[in-house]
């Protein structure tokens, strides 16, 4: 796969404006990134701007804390698909996972998968807040709930993706799930290293810099 097709070109900041979303979409079209990843209020605009291109629209739900009720997450996921999202990235209930309330975690993911149907569901586990054992447990929950990806991070917590976690997740899910690394992928070498360690998708606001092998001043 060409490197650009690994990239979910991302803008999730609270101060994102229409002009910045337009710029994001134009860059994604120019560089043929896999998707743009945005907050739900921008789905319709992105769908319009990307019509006829090979770039999909991804959005986040339950973001960034994952502590919304299951019903709220499922509604948000269903609404995102209705608005035109091709892929949805949800955040697990991290506290419930740490409490080992696995039935809750699985049902939370299942509800969102049912809401998105055949569309891609990525599940963010926020690896920086979990032990390795908890990361493995999270992967097992995601497999049981029949989601499509395990994703490392929101990029809004204490740290983002690292090579150890990407390799651990890939070794755990093998070919049963795909792995998305997000947050902290800032250089061309980071991109290559993440892919070499098992990442199937990269979430970054530095997509243009990464594929151009130029420095990035982004914090995501």
Image: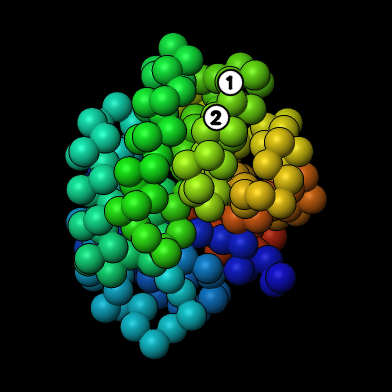
Name the element at disc 1. helix
Rendered image coloring scheme: rainbow
Q: Position of residue 109 (x, y in %)?
A: 40, 40
Q: Residue furthest top?
A: 99
Cα distance, mark 2 to mark 1?
A: 6 Å
- In this view, the residue in front, 84 or 164, is 84
The answer to whether residue 53 of the structure is visible from this angle is yes
Q: Position of residue 63 (x, y in %)?
A: 32, 38
Graded by Cα atoms within 10 Å as few (under 14), some (14 to 19) or many (20 or more), the crowding at tag 2 reads many
Q: Which residue is labeled 1 in the image?
A: 134
Seen at 62% across and 49% down, the residue is: 177
Seen at 53% across and 68% down, the residue is: 34
Seen at 26% across and 78% down, the residue is: 48
Q: Position of residue 203 (x, y in %)?
A: 52, 51
Name the element at disc 2. helix
Seen at 53% across and 52% down, the residue is: 148
Q: Is residue 158 above or below residue 111?
A: above
Is 118 on the left or on the right of 79, as rendered? Answer: right
Q: Which residue is labeled 2 in the image?
A: 138
Tell me whether the residue at label 2 lies in contact with that at label 1, contact meaning CB atoms closer than 8 angstroms.
Answer: yes
Q: Position of residue 72 (x, y in %)?
A: 20, 39
Graded by Cα atoms within 10 Å as few (under 14), some (14 to 19) or many (20 or more), the crowding at tag 1 reads some
- In this view, the residue in front, 127 or 73, is 73
Is 156 on the left or on the right of 212, as rendered? Answer: left
Is 2 on the left or on the right of 151, as rendered? Answer: right
- In this view, the residue in front, 177 or 9, is 177
Q: Residue furthest bottom?
A: 52
The answer to whether residue 58 of the structure is visible from this angle is no
Q: Quadrant of residue 128?
A: top right
Image quarter hosting the N terminus: bottom right
């Amino acid at each position: 796969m060409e490197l650009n097709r690994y990239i979910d070109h991302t803008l999730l900041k609270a101060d994102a404006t229409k002009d910045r979303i337009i710029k994001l979409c134009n860059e994604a079209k120019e560089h043929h990134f896999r998707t743009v990843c945005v907050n739900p209020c921008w789905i319709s605009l992105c769908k319009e701007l990307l019509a006829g291109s090979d770039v999909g629209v991804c959005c986040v739900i339950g973001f960034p804390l994952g502590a919304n009720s299951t019903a709220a997450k499922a509604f948000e996921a269903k609404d995102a698909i209705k608005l035109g999202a091709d892929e949805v990235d949800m955040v697990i209930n991290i506290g419930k996972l740490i409490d080992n309330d696995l039935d809750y975690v699985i049902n939370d993911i299942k509800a969102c998968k049912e809401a998105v149907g055949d569309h891609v569901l990525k599940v963010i586990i926020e690896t920086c807040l979990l032990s390795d054992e908890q990361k493995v447990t999270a992967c097992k929950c995601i497999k049981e709930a029949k989601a499509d990806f395990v994703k490392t991070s929101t990029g809004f917590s204490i740290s983002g993706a690292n090579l150890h976690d990407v390799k651990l997740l890939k070794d755990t899910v093998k070919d049963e799930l795909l792995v998305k690394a997000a947050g902290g992928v800032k250089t061309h070498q980071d991109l290559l290293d993440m892919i070499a360690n098992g990442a199937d998708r990269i979430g970054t606001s530095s997509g243009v810099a990464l594929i151009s092998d130029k420095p990035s001043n982004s914090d995501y």
